[in-house]
Amino acid sequence: MTDRDEPADDKQNPRAGGLFSGLRIVSLCTLLSRVLGFIRETAIAGLWGLSPVSDAFVGAFRIPNLARALFGEGALSAAFTPLFVREQEQHGRDAAMRLASSVFIWLGLWLTALVAVAELVLAATIWLAPLSAELRLWLALTMLMLPYLPLICLTAQMGAVLNALGRFAWPALLPVLFNVSSLAAIWILQRFDLTAEVQAHWLAGFVVLTGFLQLAAP
């Protein structure tokens, strides 16, 4: 190794160390989130048991989670992150942040319009179609939690930007905070004498509130 090669290695080591540290943080937070998510599901089962209310809530919550996997943490983030990094390397951080802001705004507008249309369709279905009580509850909970869809997708997109900037801890902690908050909400609901349907509506509203807090947190 020549003397000319040594500075290059010194410059690369801090970056490699930062990536390793970030990977360790993300892995620990992901593991903790999975454990807390299992506890949350167990708490929901303990709250409502194997009932139509539990099935309706879990089914309604699956829709925004699926959208997050597709738009927030799936193909869109996988395509956006390399573009953001390349823009930062070629034109600087300000240009990369302008690109991120543009994607953030257009994604937010598109998802909000999608949710608005879906809300109208669901509302018309509930009011006009002859539905069973279980299906009506599922549609009502879906309507309540649909606004969580753009919130969690935008949060995931913001997390992709933070990861590209080398800030791994906060995006990795957000799912942990969501599960902890959900467990706290379930504990609070158990303190009140409410029917299972009312509890489900309150918990659905809390999911949306948590989405706002997650988006505002970074």
Image (cartoon, grey):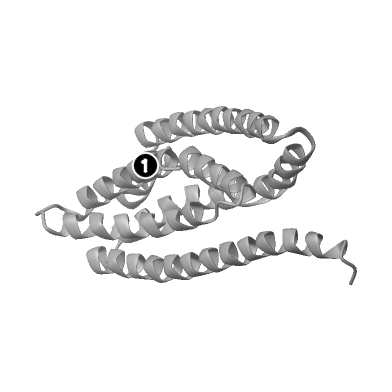
Q: Residue at x 68, y 35 (%)?
A: 96
Residue toward you, 12 or 56: 12
Is residue 188 shown to the viewer in this render? yes
Q: Residue at x 49, y 49 (%)?
A: 63
Q: Residue at x 16, y 53 (%)?
A: 195
Q: Position of residue 36 (x, y in %)?
A: 37, 67
The vertical placement of 172 against 45, above or below, is above
For label 1, the SS is helix
Is residue 130 shown to the viewer in this render? no
Q: Quadrant of residue 109?
A: top right
Classify the position of the C terminus by image quarter. top left
Q: Residue furthest front?
A: 3
Question: Which residue type does callout 1 highlight?
Answer: Leu
Residue toward you, 167 or 172: 167
Q: How many marks?
A: 1
Q: Is residue 31 left or right of residue 73?
A: left
Q: Residue furthest left?
A: 193
Q: Residue furthest right?
A: 2
Q: Position of residue 127 (x, y in %)?
A: 35, 32
Q: Is residue 59 left or right of residue 12?
A: left
Q: Residue at x 18, y 55 (%)?
A: 189
Q: Is residue 168 left or right of residue 89?
A: left
Q: Position of residue 74 (x, y in %)?
A: 64, 52
Q: Position of residue 43 (x, y in %)?
A: 28, 67
State the residue position of label 1. 213
Classify the position of the N terminus by image quarter. bottom right
- Label 1 environment density (alpha carbons within 10 Å; few <14, some 14–19, many ≥20): some
